[in-house]
Amino acid sequence: MAKKNFAQQSKEKVTFGKLIFNLRVSKSLSLRKLAKAIGLPASNLSYIENGINFPTAEIYDKIINTLQPEKGVREKLDNLYGKIRKVPPPDICEILLSNPTLYKKIRLSKNL
């Protein structure tokens, strides 16, 4: 079972990396230029794009803010981020933490 979860997570990391790569290329940014913009060594960004590593919340947020993906791509990235990290994307975490009343509303919506 652990191997299956690992394999699935690896596949999701590769998908995530391809989305980042495609976004970067569509914005005509070199690997080094994007890496510099987000404060990451180019080799680390390459590992992310190749599905070897996965960004921290801080780096993910910087990638999103720099690349400004369209809504559909952003939703795919957020979904993959949540599946791999097992937490909501950083901007959603920020909203939740600044609005504790949302906790109850979310729990209530679970019972719909």
Image (cartoon, rainbow, N blue to C red):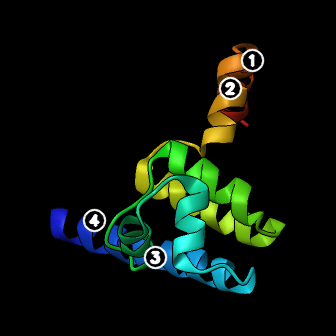
Residue 106 visible, this orientation: no
The Cα atoms of the two marked residues, 2 and 3, are separated by: 29 Å
Answer with left or right where residue 112 lies relative to residue 83.
Answer: right
The Cα atoms of the two marked residues, 1 and 2, are separated by: 5 Å
Q: Secondary structure at mark 2?
A: helix
Image x and y of residue 89, in percent: 60, 46
> Residue at label 2?
96
The answer to whether 109 is drawn above or below residue 97 in the figure is below
Q: Nearer the viewer, residue 101 or 42?
A: 42
Answer with left or right where residue 27 lies relative to residue 31.
Answer: right
> Residue at label 4?
5
Binning the other alpha carbons within 10 Å of mark 3 as few (below 14), some (14 to 19) or many (20 upward) gives many
Which label number is shown at residue 99? 1
Q: Amino acid at mark 1?
A: Asn
Binning the other alpha carbons within 10 Å of mark 1 as few (below 14), some (14 to 19) or many (20 upward) gives few
Kindly identify the residue that appears in the image at 82 percent across and 65 percent down. Answer: 71
The Cα atoms of the two marked residues, 2 and 4, are separated by: 28 Å
The Cα atoms of the two marked residues, 4 and 1, are separated by: 33 Å
The Cα atoms of the two marked residues, 3 and 4, are separated by: 20 Å
Kindly identify the residue that appears in the image at 66 percent across and 85 percent down. Answer: 25
State which tag comes first along the sequence, 3 or 4. 4
> Residue at label 3?
49
The answer to whether 60 is drawn above or below residue 72 in the figure is above
Q: Which of the 4 quarters of the picture holds residue 95? A: top right
Q: Amino acid at mark 3?
A: Glu
Answer with left or right where residue 69 lies relative to residue 7.
Answer: right
Image x and y of residue 2, in percent: 17, 62
Tally of marks: 4
Q: Secondary structure at mark 4?
A: helix
State which tag comes first along the sequence, 2 or 3. 3
State which tag comes first along the sequence, 2 or 4. 4
